[in-house]
Image (spheres, helix red, strand yellow):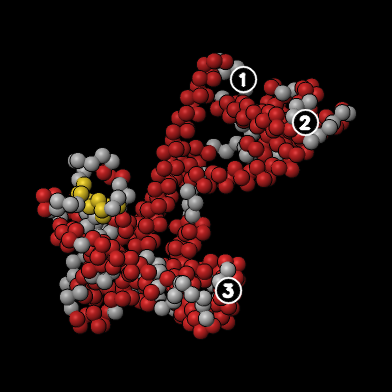
Amino acid sequence: MPPTQAESVIRSIIREIGQECAAHGEIVSETLIAFMVKAVVLDPSNGFNMDRTLMKSDVQNLVKLCMTRLLDTKNPSLDTIKMQVYFDMNYTNRVEFLEEHHRVLESRLGSVTREITDNRACAKEELESLYRKIISYVLLRSGLGSPTDIKTVREVTAALQSIFPQAELGTFLTLSKKDKERQLKELTMIVTGIRLFNRDCGKGGEGIDDLPAVLHVAIPATMQHIDYQLETARSQVYRYTAILEKAANDPHMRAELQPYMLKEALYNIRQYEVFLQIILSDIITGAQEVEMMTKQLGAHLEQLKMTIKSKTAVLSNLFTHIQPFLGAHELYFPERAMQRHLNGATVKTDVCRMKEHMEDRVNVADFRKLEWLFPETTANFDKLLIQYRGFCAYTFAATDGLLLPGNPAIGILKYKEKYYTFNSKDAAYSFAENPEHYIDIVREKAKKKIQS
């Protein structure tokens, strides 16, 4: 099937599923439907052949399978998928965010920039109008104050006149379009520097918020809130894990508990934990950048004061949007039921599990053809990119999907340029006997667990 025809068929399937969901009272985004369609097709247990054209019966089966999963609102698996789709659609790292900000800024300044660079002013009134446009441009590009605030406009005008008086417009108009654009940006930086200096001296800075002071309060408050959410999520993870471990040795408990659903809930809360860690990491990086830039700004301002002797007058509330996707926990695992199942079980934290095997390390001599890494012999040991988000691959494969954190202190296995950790020495040895076998198991489980 030609690519254009295949795309048309996929769009048609997505549209049909969306209409069917709406008919059942569920409004589902096309992005989520597309994700589900891809996941269902890739799941080998569904029997779709990627090498042949989909028949009508295949399409009907695909729609039916997708509908079943999308309408199963009580399954934590669907919430996990929704969380992943939402995060992927809304999360951007710092570099991408700044690039998008600059792109939007240039787009908004486009019309003002053209009005200035294409201007052919000659008369006095026309030159005054052009100068006012340049003032507006400087304010808009700097983002420090509103062009409609009289005091701010007066301050910017005074600063601009000190370095670029209106009498120099004649020379400006003779420049090429590219040189005009370059000079406008330079004027903005200089005027912004003058205003920041004046503000620091207490002699100006109209409309400029004290951003460092705002961030000094906002960043710690945000980090504290996310730390609390992380602590709560991890507490739930430890309890779920303890129940699953207990149920593994109790057939009667397994029959009553439905471990499958509890594992889906565990995957859900672990995914939430991962997203919170990503957000927290970005906030910490942002806080470090703010601290560094604040110090640099302070140093530059002090240097300026010394030079002229004081004579001159972006994280996060994403987590709040991903919290609603945890709704199935209380429905399927209410606190009273949790306490009953926890009776006799030992709830362990991730740190506690690691401490249990801290001294139980892999003996390198037992593996002649495999490479093991340890903190005392490996540079940047703590920065290695561990597979499966640091969870033990052997445990996940051997226990039908239980998530236990790997312990790097036991030894990190380097296999085909990828790194793996394990929750115990026994798990490490078992995995090392046949890495491909367990990697294949994890891969197949991931295909079936589309939220993994």
Cα separation between marks 3 and 2: 56 Å
**Mark 1 sits on what residue?**
312
Residue 58 x/y as whole percent: 49, 81
Task: Using the rendered image of the protein, determine whether residue 67 is visible from the camera's viewpoint.
Answer: no
Name of the residue lying farthest toward the right? 123
Give the amino acid at mark 2.
Answer: Tyr
Q: Write down the quadrant of residue 237 in the picture.
A: bottom left
Cα separation between marks 3 and 1: 68 Å
Name the element at disc 1: loop
Residue 112 x/y as whole percent: 74, 40
Name the element at disc 3: helix
Give the amino acid at mark 1.
Answer: Thr
Q: Residues within 10 Å of mark 2 (few under 14, many from 20)?
A: many
For the C terminus, the image quarter is bottom left
**Mark 3 sits on what residue?**
9
Q: Write down the quadrant of residue 152 in the picture.
A: top right
| Nearest-to-viewer mark from 2 and 1 | 2
In-image side of 225 versus 312 (left or right): left
- Identify the residue at horizontal 49%, vertical 72% (top origin): 37
Q: Earlier in the sequence, mark 2 or mark 1?
A: 2
For the N terminus, the image quarter is bottom right
In-image side of 5 versus 111 (left or right): left
Q: Earlier in the sequence, mark 3 or mark 1?
A: 3
Q: Earlier in the sequence, mark 3 or mark 2?
A: 3
**Mark 2 sits on what residue?**
131
